Amino acid sequence: MGDQVSKSNMKAISNISRIQVRNETLMLLLDLYESKGKTFYYDDLFKKDIDAFLKKSLEEDIYEIAKYLNLDLTDARINLCAKRDFVPKNKDEQLLFNIKKVLYRIQNNSERFELIANEIHELGKTLGSNHTSVNWQKTKSEFEDGLFDNSNFKNTREALEKLISLYKSLIKAKEYELVNVNTNFYVDFVNMQIFDNLNDLIALFVLYSLIFQTFPIFKYVSFFKHFRSLMKPWEYAINQANYNWASKFPQTDNLTELVYRMLIESYKEVDDFAYSYEFERDLNKSDSLENTILKFKKLFTKEDLREVHPTISDSTINRTLQRLKDERKIIVIGAGRSSKWQVIDVRDTKFSRIELFKDKED
């Protein structure tokens, strides 16, 4: 009876063999694993600037997940949390601070993440630190026919351990594609309500950790940027899986396909800037920065330059801006952090900076 009870709670992963791979999905898989083959190339190409890439990816992830969770925070506070150490002033800031800590650990130590109940519980406690207590649920045991045994309550830790055991046995057997196993594990985790608080958020970070281990492309691009861009289809796929979960035939294939698309788009993003990075690496960084600046058709900020050149230091940006200003190729508008820059159109010989409040000299 014990095995029957445990498997009845794992309605997605225990029925993974029923999933039929469509031709469209197979084509996505071929594209994905062809892209994954470039991982060693990217690691070698970006190795000198890996810290800069991790920092940029972390900042984008924090901003995107704050928007996904609809935290009641201004963009300024979100960016402060993303870019600097800060002291949380309310519950939402505390949660975002905790999320930043979790994201940093995943990005910098993904190879050390081990799928065990204690590790997941510690993840939950870190997310809930000074915000929400996170404890194991207590649930009634369920018989194979779907009825509950009112006399027997079980801690969900045992259910999670059995889910993890089944997950690892599927991975070891190598009969199913890894992302497919991950998403079915995720659907079971969500529906089994392992924890009494933050369960969905914990499940999402467990899924992210598992994906990161296999596809470390998210050292270079934001996972949650691509995740949030697919929010509507993601919510539809989750609802579809959850609706049929109780009947032991959850439809998880759409969810898995979305993860494939997310990964493919992430590899495409890296491809897009890998070429320019390699070109830039072989040039003087200041010259490369100048080339970008002179292409701007509108006002730009230092932040705009950091977006295009995340690996170039602030000192190089400042020196290049000052040089181009001295060469009268650009002008500065405003002062301090709010200052913006404008390229001088050399074809306009009458161009001059307007200084409204400066006294004219005789």
Image: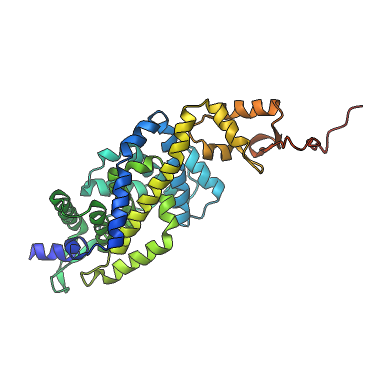
**x and y percentages locating residue 333 in the rendered image:** 71, 37
In this view, the residue in front, 65 or 250, is 250
Q: Is residue 91 visible?
A: no
Place residue 55 in its image quadrant: top left
**x and y percentages locating residue 47 in the rendered image:** 38, 30
- Whether residue 128 is situated above or below residue 80 in the rendered picture: below
Residue in view at x 40 percent, y 33 percent: 46
Q: Quadrant of the N terminus?
A: bottom left
Place residue 154 in its image quadrant: bottom left
Query: In the figure, is residue 138 to the left or right of 327?
Result: left
Residue in view at x 25 percent, y 54 percent: 182
- Whether residue 340 is situated above or below residue 254 in the rendered picture: above
**x and y percentages locating residue 222 in the rendered image:** 42, 46
Residue farthest toward the left in the current orientation of the protein: 1
- Whether residue 133 is situated above or below residue 142 in the rendered picture: above
Query: In the figure, is residue 193 to the left or right of 218?
Result: left
Query: In the figure, is residue 73 to the left or right of 10?
Result: right
